[in-house]
Amino acid sequence: MAKVCLEVKQRRPAKFSSRQYNRCQNCGRRRAYIRRFQICRICFRELASQGKIPGVVKASW
């Protein structure tokens, strides 16, 4: 319940620009956000492993 409340609160425009923060588009997580893909690290890993993010390849050497 509290998480939904915070997500709704984040959608409203911030009073000051420094109070704005990013959220993952899939799960709503705000920590470990990757700006380039607009998702968190956990969702990024899952989608990259499934091959759903174009151009991302698992490193191997």
Image (cartoon, grey):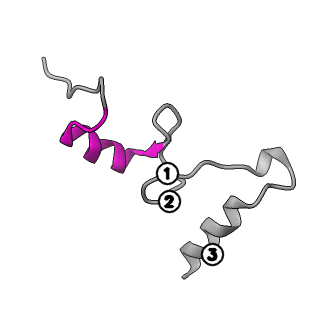
Residue 61, by quadrant, is top left
Left or right position of 5 against 61: right
Q: Position of residue 21 (x, y in %)?
A: 66, 49
Give, as a single range, the part of the protein colored magenta: 39-53
Q: Position of residue 57 (x, y in %)?
A: 22, 25
Describe the element under mark 2 as helix, strand or loop: loop
Left or right position of 13 against 44: right
Seen from this angle, which residue lies furthest top?
61
- The residue tagged 2 is 28
Number of numbered tags placed on the structure image? 3
Tell me if residue 54 comes above or below residue 30 in the rendering. Answer: above
Q: As shown in the figure, which amino acid type bears the numbered disc 1? A: Cys
| Discs 2, 1 touching: Cβ within 8 Å | yes
- The residue tagged 1 is 24
Q: As shown in the figure, which amino acid type bears the numbered disc 2? A: Gly
Q: As shown in the figure, which amino acid type bears the numbered disc 3? A: Cys
Seen from this angle, which residue lies furthest bottom?
1
Q: Please tell me whether residue 48 belongs to the stretch shown in magenta.
A: yes
Distance (Cα) linking label 2 and label 3:
11 Å
Closest to the observer: 17 or 8? 8
Distance (Cα) linking label 3 and label 1:
15 Å
User: Residue at position x 50%, y 41% from top?
Assistant: 38
Q: Position of residue 27 (x, y in %)?
A: 43, 59
- The residue tagged 3 is 5
Describe the element under mark 3 as helix, strand or loop: helix
User: Residue at position x 70%, y 67% from top?
Assistant: 9
User: Residue at position x 50%, y 59% from top?
Assistant: 28
Q: Please tell me whether residue 12 belongs to the stretch shown in magenta.
A: no
Quick one: label 2, few (<14), some, or many (20+) residues within 10 Å?
some
Distance (Cα) linking label 2 and label 1:
5 Å
**Image quarter of the N terminus:** bottom right
